[in-house]
Amino acid sequence: MEKNNRRKILNLIIWGWAGVTSIPFLSTVFRFTSPPKREGPITAAVSTTEEVPPNSGKTVSLGNRPVLLITTPEGERRAFLANCTHLGCVVRYREEENDIYCACHHSVFDIEGKNMSGPAPRPLPQLPIEIENDNIVVTVS
Amino acid sequence: MIQKYFKNWCGERLPLDTIRNHFKNKFVPRHRHTIWYYLGGLTVFFFVIQLLTGVLLMIYYKPTMEGAHQSVVYIINEVPFGWLIRSIHSWAANLMIATLLLHLMSVFYLQAYRPPRELMWMSGFILLFLILGFGFTGYLLPWDDIAFYATQIGTEVPKSIPLVGPTLVALLRGGEDIGEATITRMYTLHVFVLPIATLLFVGIHLFLSQYYGASKPITTRPKGKDIPFYPNFVLRDLRTWCIALILLIGVAILMPWGLGEEADILRPAPEGVKPEWYFIPMYQTLNILPARILIFDGETILNSVLMIGGFVVFLLPFLDRKAKQRERNKFILTAGTLVILYCIVITVSAYI
Amino acid sequence: MYAKMIFTIFVGTSLLFSLDTGPNTVVCDLVVMQVQAGQNNIETKIEFPSFEYRINLLLYFVFPVLILLILLILKIRQLDLHLDDDSRTN
């Protein structure tokens, strides 16, 4: 009886320790597969002012992210992260409706980036924008 | 309670009792050659390591001419533990081939291929070629200059096979020369075709090994009682795997696998272009052989000898009539020993 | 009882998912393609971590395996003792 118990305890210790042994290996696999962190803020000239005339939009890439540049009919320039806040599809500017639209699930944002209708839960994040020598300079964090 | 319920649920649906009875009644003979029984399991262990690390490397590797070398550099320099995973993959590949060759030799010397285990020998022989195929196709993937030239030479060899040679070379290279098409072809073979074929044959090989059990050598006397396969022998296998894992991680960390300069098609061949050590006997024989022997091409002769030799080894269980009657076949053992000695001597001569 | 369990699992997973719906949880194909096209500024010299670091790493991996190995050897001994007991009685 006592012998049987001892055997059981040793089995338990072995199984338990096998679990412990797997931890460094599993964590290594996890670290290996985790994608590298995004780098800090990137600022770059992404377009010329001529390419985005009033009442138009243009999608550019900055630090591997899509950025939507728009110029309102009044000539005001804005930049948004172009991923829809619903499920991340890339949004576009609609000249006729004068708004921003996501074709995936029909979310509509106004030209301030505010979510107006459709499933989008939050406004589009607006990005700092500057005009330097006819170039549009955008910062993405 | 849940455990018991789960056991019953599975037991009603799967032949668990049959499997349990099989393992209960399986014994491994104990004698002074028992140690050789671990080599097959060890090879499987390294193969599993290769599958796991291979999948991990596949996440970052890019099989293109611009991307191949860069992505391997990226894995080594940037990805956390990337250098380690690649080092383990390279080391385990070599260790796997080493244990595979030792396993082959032990089966040969213990004449375990004799009836009824002919199919085990034949499936094992096919596995040998599949694993060598892994080595050959994987060697090119980092796209460094040594690998480039080794593959250049390696894919040139089948050219001298009559009739099918040039077609075979073109198929391997995906064109006249080695380039992007070669990388994608080698990659497809390395990560898909060969793994599937190998898993199939490993399955057959393992099933047969369970079915027949370990072979008792002809002349050896048993030492004590046979060992129950489960749990005694399984634990011994696990013990061997632990030792192998320690050794593997040790070499992979202390001697991390390097990477040469990126291959350049225009650069002349660098010094010391050599295939991996397991291809050296073939490569070196090609170097020694005169270009022409009588009316035949040197390469053609080597290819023919290798093909006939391979065929003889494949059919060895049928050719060895003495082993069938449980006698040692001196002729075959001597011939095999001579071949092994030749391989060892020529490999050593290539490295001096 | 099962209905309750399934309901709990359902509510639990829904809650977990609802916690994790930031703007970038699902990324379009476009973005993925740009990621692949973007990595072109990698140097070609490889570098391994320092020897001290690697020794520590070796201990980190090998130490647990070594303990497991010792436990396995103990277990094998225990079983073999039993095996020899059997052979004596036979």
Image: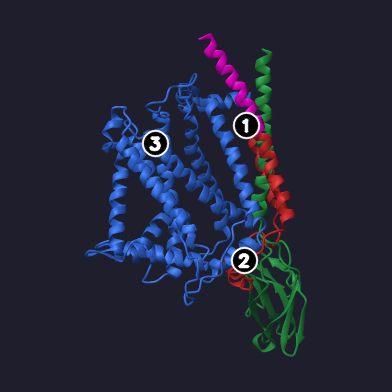
Magenta part of the protein: which range?
Answer: C70-90
Relative to C34, residue C67 above or below:
above
Alpha carbon distance from label 2 to label 3:
65 Å
Q: A55 and B303: which one is in front? A: B303
Is residue C8 something that shows in the picture? no
Disc 3 crowd, CA 10 A, few/some/many (<14, 14-19, 20+): some
State the image coordinates of residue B152 (x, y, percent, origin top left): 42, 67
Q: Which mark is residue B109?
A: 3
Disc 1 crowd, CA 10 A, few/some/many (<14, 14-19, 20+): few
Please state which of the two labelled residues, at mark 2 or mark 1, is closer to the viewer: 2
Q: Which residue is mark 2?
A: A89
Q: Is residue B129 left or right of residue B85?
A: left
Residue A101 covered by magenta stretch: no
Q: Amino acid at mark 2?
A: Cys
Alpha carbon distance from label 2 to label 1:
38 Å
Which chain contains the residue that carries disc 3?
B
Q: Amino acid at mark 3?
A: Tyr
Q: How many numbered discs sit on the rendered protein?
A: 3
Q: Is residue B283 left or right of residue C21?
A: left
Q: Which chain is blue?
A: B
SS label for mark 2: loop
Chain C tint in image: red
State the image coordinates of residue B112 (x, y, percent, origin top left): 37, 33
Quadrant for the C terminus of chain A, please: bottom right
Give the dominant element type of the magenta stretch: helix, strand or loop.
Answer: helix
Q: Are marks 2 and 1 on the same chain?
A: no
Determine the residue located farthest toward the left in the rendered image: B295
Is residue B175 something that shows in the picture? yes
Q: Which residue is mark 1?
A: C2
Relative to B144, residue B253 above or below:
above
Which chain contains the residue that carries disc 2?
A
